[in-house]
Amino acid sequence: TPEPGPDYSVTFKPLGDKIVADTVTVPEGYVAEVLYSAGDKCVIGSAGYMGVPQSYPATETQSGGQHDGMHFYPLEGVDPNQGGLLVLNHESLDNSTLDVTVEGVKTRLSNVGVSVVEIVRDKDGKWAVKTDSRYNKRYTGNTVYNVGGPAASVVGATVVGTLNNCASGNTPWGTYLTCEETTDNYLDPTQAETGYGWVVEIDPSTPGSTAVKRTAMGRFDHENTAFMVDENNRVAFYMGDDGTPGCIYKFVPSKPYDPANRANNSKLLDEGTLYAARFNDDGSGNWVELTVGKNNLIVGAIDPGNYTQVAPTDVPTNTLIDFNSQADVLINTKAAARVAGATLMDRPEWITVGVDKTVYCTLTNNSSRRRTNAANPRETNRHGHIVRWNERGNSPLATTFEWQLLLLAGQDAADGAASNITGNIKGDEFSSPDGIRVDPKGRLWVQTDAGTGTSVTSIFGNNSMYYIDQKTGESKRFLVGPLGCEITGIAYTPDLTTFFINIQHPNAAWNTVRAGGGDARSATVVVRRQDGKPVGA
Ligand code: FEO
Ligand code: CA
Ligand code: CA
Ligand code: CA
């Protein structure tokens, strides 16, 4: 059993079952306050959405929609528990804040991407966006991005736009990695589809810089990134492909990162080795290298396709695919992983690396699963599960690992539910784990993105956030979102007295500006304790 962090217990009183309130519900002694909503002022001079639907170019200065992955960065010269930069993704559109009769395409494209906002805390402990900060910046679907790595030769030196900015990660050198989740959602006919589906590196502390698409990390339905560092500053980045199904990847830059000179890390993500994970049924695992010429990645390779959706007796639809170059491997990473023998998982969402270097990944659900294996054990997996592994020697450079299932989500066996929807959670039940992060105290937090129809909420309540005991698998419900939302994004100040959580796609009366509502907006909320002590402790 992995060893959790130095101080991983919690003391909050868990929330009750089946909460379907149209508000953010938190434990006794806690408050939840809206900090930054879709349409709010971002860039200096922005007027912000005030109830009147907005169009391009004003939308380029305002918060995008559908807040998702997020990270908090200290600022030089500022007490990091009193202020810093909050960087967050906008996965999709908050339509009701937009007037798409003017510059319809550009207006929509400016509602996705990333916000960088400086935030400050007042003497009462309340947080606010500093609307006159020179750091405040939007990266949108209309912004120009540089392209780095081996596939730049095909993609081009620059690309206009980022899309489907789902979850994210940070790097040891203080940059932000926004992840483009869907490669084929809304193709811009003016641009080759190879422009999307990448990890994009942003330097929030240098507002004049241009973000870079890092093609060496592969093109797939990127969920987030999480890193592990060793004593020699070698780094691995773990990444999920939220495909139905998809693989789990890691990217190991060829060189160590330089903790002393930040500029030396500016091309670190352009050169390295990409791997995909094979989860063997005996609990062992292999990182299969996705390098052209290795592991059958050759001209005339056989791609078995999505064989997990057909009956075990049926033959996969083998098709031929040519890998002529590493650019081919990186542009067709999903196929490369299948060819190389990686395991197709039940929609890998977030990955997190614990303080004890155990790696966790949420597998949110996969109703289409027909062929099972030990790592994806349920047919018609409606509620998902969480897998964890330890690298050999806890090294980011390892090519083998040992894995186990932390838990199967779903209903209690005592409910008499069918086996595919019965889980083994001890404590508070949930469905469809998505966001996951181990905080610096070693505490594991999980957020859910289950269906929001009454057939789901009558069992589990609204989407929620949980503390999970890593040894026992016991679950404690910490926060429940308003109607229709998913809970995503986990960030915090270094002293853990403030947590930042995102409420995505609320659909009712919560957080509206217009009289009478109708514009329920995605938002970042601050969660803190009334007594000012660390969250959860
Ligand atoms: Fe955008 Fe996979 O959640
Ligand atoms: Ca997600
Ligand atoms: Ca999801
Ligand atoms: Ca979402």
Image (cartoon, rainbow, N blue to C red):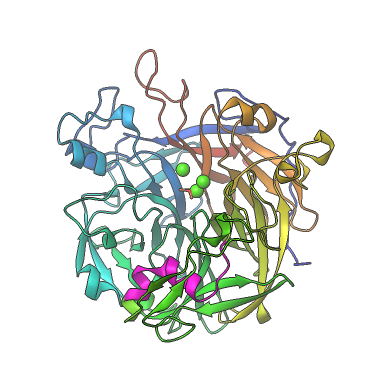
Q: Is residue 343 magenta?
A: yes
Kindly give the residue lying farthest to the bottom in the view shown: 293
Q: Is residue 280 above or below residue 41?
A: below
The foreground one among 197 and 281 is 281
The foreground one among 141 and 317 is 317
Q: Is residue 154 left or right of residue 248?
A: left
Task: Point out the stretch of residues depicted in magenta.
Answer: 328-344
Q: Is residue 453 left or right of residue 193?
A: right
The foreground one among 147 and 371 is 371
Q: Residue at x 42, y 65 (%)?
A: 174
Q: Is residue 105 magenta?
A: no
Query: Residue 472 placed where, x, y %?
Result: 80, 54
Query: Residue 232 placed where, x, y %?
Result: 53, 84
Q: Residue at x 75, y 67 (%)?
A: 2
Mark yes or no: residue 265 visible: no
- Split into 4 quadrants, where in the image is the N terminus? bottom right
Query: Residue 222 placed where, x, y %?
Result: 43, 58
The foreground one among 245 and 465 is 245
Q: In terms of image quadrants, where is residue 478?
A: top right
Q: Residue at x 57, y 59 (%)?
A: 308
Q: Is residue 434 above or below residue 531?
A: below
Kindly give the residue lying farthest to the top in the view shown: 516
Mark yes or no: residue 461 visible: yes
Q: Residue at x 27, y 39 (%)?
A: 62
Main secondary structure type of the part rendered in magenta = helix
